[in-house]
Image (cartoon, rainbow, N blue to C red):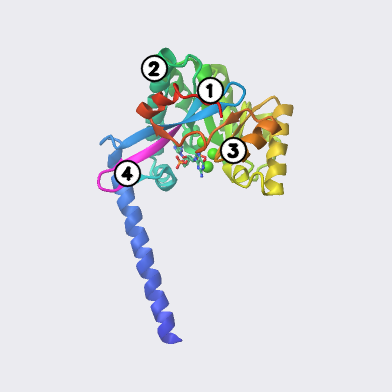
């Protein structure tokens, strides 16, 4: 038993070491990556069922580290938040996405709306609103064509800084979407307190549709709540026809997911404008 305990201990420390080294290597490389231009913005279309056409896109960050291929944002965003890199990185994504979208609006799709994920850390930056305003001015993108995706967790932080921030953003004219809706555990009263324009049903609910009655009931409830509160509702993670059919029947108009397209580089996104989305 003693042997075994010792082995476990060794295994444990080795694994911790490997993980710590991996993390250390990510962190040091991450600090260089922005200057070295290793980040890319991918775009995933949002489809409107009524018109069978693209209405928007979500900007999703990718890190192309030489020798290591694409690294998932799920892996590096938390580190970027910890080391403070999320502020310059988040601003870079906003700039890229606004610039690209305005170009697309001029060349392909006059009403295209871009959604950009905003970390809670960026919301603590009092300069965020000014930066967005300047970026809109410089790129020519109208404010109503920019949507910020935030998560429920943010709404549980300090109200004294949150409310003025929301007020400035609202005055600017950008819209706010509540991402991963239904996975947080804050109270629903914030839907009243904050100027939220869109609810994005988390893909964990969409995944089990139509087989899991609980997911079906929850998705229906979220769609009904959005309608009652005059918010638009978007479903993410739509992967198959049954889900599309269910969402259409339930009155959810805006869909996003692999069924239509994965996130793709800008050059590839352009080919999607030409695609026939019927069926
Ligand atoms: P998210 O905002 O919830 O983004 C949706 C994620 O679901 C994306 O993962 C997308 O690629 C993936 N996805 C889209 N359609 C499907 C589908 O049909 N099935 C499945 N299984 N997945 C689908 P991704 O690109 O790996 O991003 C992961 C998370 O990283 C994002 O989750 C977001 O929280 C964060 N993130 C990505 N880009 C940024 C960014 O620029 N800034 C910040 N702050 N966070 C970002
Ligand atoms: Ca998102
Ligand atoms: Ca989401
Ligand atoms: Ca998510």
Q: Secondary structure at mark 4?
A: helix
Give the residue at mark 4: 30
Please identify, in this view, whether the residue under mark 4 or under mark 2 is nearer the observer.
2
Q: Which residues are magenta?
A: 59-69
Q: Toward the viewer: 206 or 156?
A: 206
What number is the disc on residue 55?
1
The quadrant of the picture showing ligand 3 is top right
The residue drawn where x is 30% and y is 36% is 34
Q: Where does residue 54 sit, x and y in percent of width and height?
A: 51, 24
Is there a contact, CB below 8 Å, between mark 2 and mark 3? no
- Considering the numbered disc 2 on the image, is that residue within a helix, a strand or a loop? helix
Residue 236 appears at what percent x and percent y? 56, 37
Task: Using the numbered discs, state the Cα–Cα distance from disc 4 to disc 2 in whole angstroms.
Answer: 29 Å
Q: Which secondary structure type mostly characterizes the magenta part of the structure?
A: strand
Q: For label 2, count other residues whose C-alpha is less than 10 Å away and answer few (under 14), some (14-19) or many (20+).
A: some
User: Residue 247, position in %: x, y?
Assistant: 65, 34
Q: Is mark 4 within 8 Å of ligand 1?
A: no
> Residue at 44% across / 35% down in the picture?
263
Q: Secondary structure at mark 1?
A: strand
């Amino acid at each position: 038993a003693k042997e075994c305990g010792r082995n476990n201990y060794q295994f444990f420390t080795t694994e911790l070491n490997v993980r710590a080294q991996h993390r250390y290597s990510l962190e040091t490389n991450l600090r260089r990556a922005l200057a070295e231009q290793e980040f890319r913005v991918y775009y995933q279309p949002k489809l409107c069922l009524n018109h069978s056409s693209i209405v928007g896109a979500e900007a999703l960050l990718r890190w192309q580290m030489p020798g290591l291929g694409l690294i998932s944002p799920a892996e590096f965003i938390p580190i970027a938040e910890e080391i403070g890199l999320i502020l310059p990185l988040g601003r870079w994504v906003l700039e890229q996405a606004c610039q690209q979208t305005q170009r697309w609006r001029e060349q392909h799709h006059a009403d295209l709306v871009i959604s950009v994920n905003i970390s809670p850390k960026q919301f603590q930056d009092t300069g965020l609103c000014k930066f967005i305003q300047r970026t809109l001015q410089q790129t020519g993108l109208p404010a109503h064509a920019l949507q910020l995706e935030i998560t429920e967790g943010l709404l549980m932080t300090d109200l004294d800084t949150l409310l003025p921030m929301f007020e400035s953003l609202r005055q600017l004219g950008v819209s706010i979407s509540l991402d991963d809706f239904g996975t947080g555990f804050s109270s629903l009263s914030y839907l009243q307190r904050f100027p939220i324009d869109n609810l994005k049903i988390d893909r964990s609910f969409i995944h089990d549709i139509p087989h899991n009655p609980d997911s079906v009931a929850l998705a229906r409830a979220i769609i009904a709540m959005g309608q009652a509160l005059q918010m638009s509702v978007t479903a993410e993670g739509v992967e198959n026809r049954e889900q599309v059919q269910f969402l259409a029947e339930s009155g959810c108009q805006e869909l996003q997911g692999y069924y239509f397209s994965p996130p793709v580089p800008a050059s590839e996104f352009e080919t999607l404008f030409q695609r026939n989305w019927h069926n």
